[in-house]
Image (tube, grey):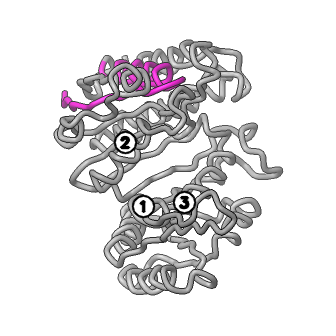
Amino acid sequence: MRRHAIVVVPGDGIGPEVTREALKVLEAVEASGFCGVDAVVRDWGAERYLRTGETLPPEGLDEFRRAAAVFMGAFGDPRVPDMRHAADILLGTRFRLDLYVNERPVRVLADRLCPLKHVAAESISFTVFRENTEGLYVGIGGQFKRGTPDEIAVQEDVNTRKGVERIIRHAFAFARARGLTRVCMSDKSNVLRFGHDLWQRVFAEVGDEYPEIEREHLYVDALVMQLVRRPQSFQVIVTCNMFGDIVTDLGAALQGGLGMAASGNVHPGVAAMFEPVHGSAPKYAGQDIANPFGAVLTAAMMLEHLGETAAARAVEGAVAEAVRAEQCTRDLGGSLGTEAAGSFVAEWIRRGNQ
């Protein structure tokens, strides 16, 4: 049995609760003979920051680099209003490890979870690739005459040839490897005439290397409209950092809410960090009501990244069965708490692979 060393940072709010269920499911994966995961759990989060003033310790990034993967829970605590610890731990890891691929799969596991009328769950299956290290989120800019009537605030949108090309190329390579036939690139080049003209040119040039794949371009406002009108027509979407942040939340709504949304942050061959995207929801912490399936499906993404495809499919299948049987939390139509929903998935894996 192959074993994989990972680092786990449960984080804040409901993060420790949903992470606990994801680790429980990984234990079931090992008990069923798929693979083993050796997890080192770190307490880097708001509690530690408030106690010591430390966000991510200096050795943290080196530990992340050495690991096969990193699993994070959720970050954010009202006791840290500026969210400095979250920025250092989560965003800092993305930027400093150059995790330029943000991958967000959108799959609907039951008709009742999709808010769209007359759209079958099985018809929605696409993946969004968000450029993860550039754009408006790099924090370049400033303020002049702050707090006065003449204040000026400038925020720079950074797009490099290297950054744009590698995320677009990754999207096409992903499509080819899975036998998919359509890639959609979304920008706002009709208004952002410089930065997003670069996206247009690179999309055309890289697309020429994949003649078997149909290319579609949509301005981002048109994309969000079409994701509501015809989500079943999309297979792979690639876009910039800010637009990807927005579009993927719409994707999460299509699949039943943020509690079902998994994500990976990857630099292929270098480092990878996986996280559910629902946030820390501190007002729900400790109440055993948070949906753990986003974290569990994130664990499945991590397993696939580690080359454990059969284990990943087993986890996904168990979550699908939990949704089908309504053995899930209230937001999905069930009546279970966080712990019981995670236990159902873990036991389903064990029973299915004895």
Q: Tag 2: residue type?
A: Asp
Pointer 2: what residue? 88
Work out whether 113 lies above or below 348. Answer: below
Work out whether 219 lies above or below 128. Answer: below
What is the quadrant of residue 115 in the picture?
top right
Where does the image place residue 63, in percent across and percent down from the top left? 19, 36
Q: Is residue 343 magenta?
A: no
Earlier along the polypeptide chain: callout 2 or callout 3?
Answer: 2
For numbered disc 1, what is the local secondary structure?
A: helix
Which label is found at residue 244? 3
Q: Which residues are magenta?
A: 1-30
Categorize mark 2 by other alpha carbons within 10 Å: few (<14), some (14-19), many (20+).
some
Judge from the rendering whether residue 93 lies leftward or rightward of residue 279; answer left or right: left
For numbered disc 3, what is the local secondary structure?
A: helix
Q: Are marks 1 and 3 in contact (CB under 8 Å)?
A: no
Pointer 1: what residue? 138
In 3D space, how far apart are the residues under numbered discs 1 and 3 (Cα atoms)? 15 Å
Question: What is the quadrant of the C terminus in the image?
Answer: top left
